[in-house]
Image (spheres, rainbow, N blue to C red):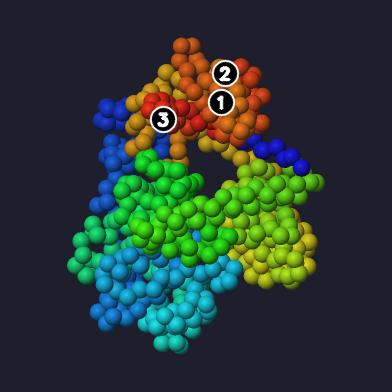
Amino acid sequence: MSVPPVRPRWRPPRSPPDEVVRDLGRALKLPEPLCRLLAARGHTTPAAAKAFLRPSLSDLHDPAQLADMDRAVDRLERALDDGETVFVHGDYDVDGMCAAALYTRVLDRLGGRVVPFVPHRMRDGYDLGPSGVRQAREAGAAVILTADCGIVAHAAVAAAGEAGMDVIVTDHHTPGATLPDAVAVVNPKREDCAYPNRHLSGTGVAYKVALALARRRGLPDEEIHYTLDLVALATVADVMPLEGENRILTRYGLRVLEQTRTPGLRALREAAGLGDRSLTAGHLSHVMAPRLNAVGRLEDAAAGLRLLLASEGEAGGLARDLEAVNARRQAVDREILGQALDALDGYDPETDRGVVLAGTGWHPGVIGIVASRVVERIHRPTVLIAVEEGKAVSRGSARSVPGFDLLDAIRACGEHLERFGGHAAAAGFDIRTDRIDAFRAAFADAARDRLPEPPVPEQRIDLELTLEEITPELVRYMAYGAPYGLGNPTPVFALRGVEAAGVRAVGDGSHLKLRLVDGDRSIPAIGFRMMETHGEAARSGRVDAAVKLEADEWRGRRRIQAKLVDLRSAG
């Protein structure tokens, strides 16, 4: 079934007071559109705008503010002093791999004995569990240091204690009603934790622990700053808000990554075709992170961790291996997406508030990605269930739309599930295969209760511009607002009533290329995978275009290009 994408409703820009915009312009000598953008996003004084445009590592919070930090550092110091083995237990996603690699690099730099580990998605399962405890015991570890996991692993922490091992939990996921009985639990989401940033990634928490430990051991902060390449990659990959401290960590992490000491990250950049390009958060989220995540989804995340810890001689081959796995993951994604869209036969956008799709042979490691693709197409909470032939239990993954608490809805269907977990935007569960139809009906009811009207996506518009206002100076200064991502989205500008000229399909025929023209001003524009959905509007002559602005480099020449976000006939 060919399901047309849902067209968004444009949300008009905020209008900051003119006097605030004028004050910023006088004080900062910046283009007026940029001052409007800064004011609309809450940076209304020259001091606030300067702090946003030029953040500093000195603005980072003191790691000592994290609850249990002293206890964690005390125990790690004792392990270093006594030559004890520290078993670093990460997770099978990018954040977990990066956090485990960061701890391994820092503990090794401090002369420690460290054994890194990340679980196999299918064999070991998520979180610190029996497999991790067993392997820590076999490694002769005195300490298990978790990285991006462990906050609800009460049984595993207790089992490790009974086996004579101390556990230090460092995590960023939401704690349960009680904390695990560990030597220390470092997590900014603890209710009794006064740390100002509750949205650190798991690797961000690991960085804070490493920084506190290094300071205790007399190492300068600069020796730990070199791990910010891992922090940036994890923060973006785990979709942490790029505000305040996270934005600082990511901004400086991108700089470190461009000259990284980590052979594996250099090899990953090369294999992904990024070479010596200046890196953006988009390169991390759309190019580098998927390659590491792919191996955790389809094979063994240990291969990703090996790459992050590889020597110069090993890194190139490991990166090429990951490239091959990612290509296979993309093929699997496309195949399952096609089948999932076909399974939407009978979907009614007027009456259906949520969908549950199940397929035999779907790979459980990629159904979450495909669920996100379906949500992009239909803008409904979507559940995909991977059914394995002959197995009594299947695995599900779900993705939501803004304003719909997915975990709450799935909890309402909990009687049909073996286990479940997640948050408002994403969730996963195990379900007996013979309960799928009952769950589908229950989820449809839960979605209808929570979404009385069909949800409509919104396209945020930051500013309305004329082509005359789009200058190289504006685009250059906009780079100071980066890194862009969740919490600090790339600005979207509306160009009203401009002419669409030179409309054509490019690439494989799915991409839309044109020029946006107003009088003697024009700008090239590209809409990726928009020919089928927006080609008719482009050929209508006068259009309203929602665009992002970027500096495009082609054959040594730099020019401003508009990246189309949406396009509609004017008027």
Residue type (three-letter) at the residue carrying disc 3: Glu
Residue 257 or 179: which is nearer the viewer? 257
**Where does the image place residue 71, in percent across and percent down from the top left?**
32, 75
Residue 220 or 242: which is nearer the viewer? 220
Quarter in which the N terminus is drawn: top right
* Residue linked to disc 2: 502
Residue type (three-letter) at the residue carrying disc 2: Gly
Q: Upstream in the sequence, badge 3 or badge 1?
A: 1
Residue depicted at 64% across the width and 20% down the height: 539
As measured in the structure, the alpha-carbon distance from the residue carrying label 2 to the one carrying label 1 is 8 Å
Q: Are the residues flagged by discs 2 and 1 in contact, CB closer than 8 Å? A: yes
As measured in the structure, the alpha-carbon distance from the residue carrying label 3 to the one carrying label 1 is 16 Å
* Residue linked to disc 1: 513
Can you tell which quarter of the image residue 111 is in?
bottom left
- Tag 2's secondary structure? strand
**With 5 as the anchor, is 94 left or right in this view?**
left
Residue 353: mark: none
Residue 553: mark: 3
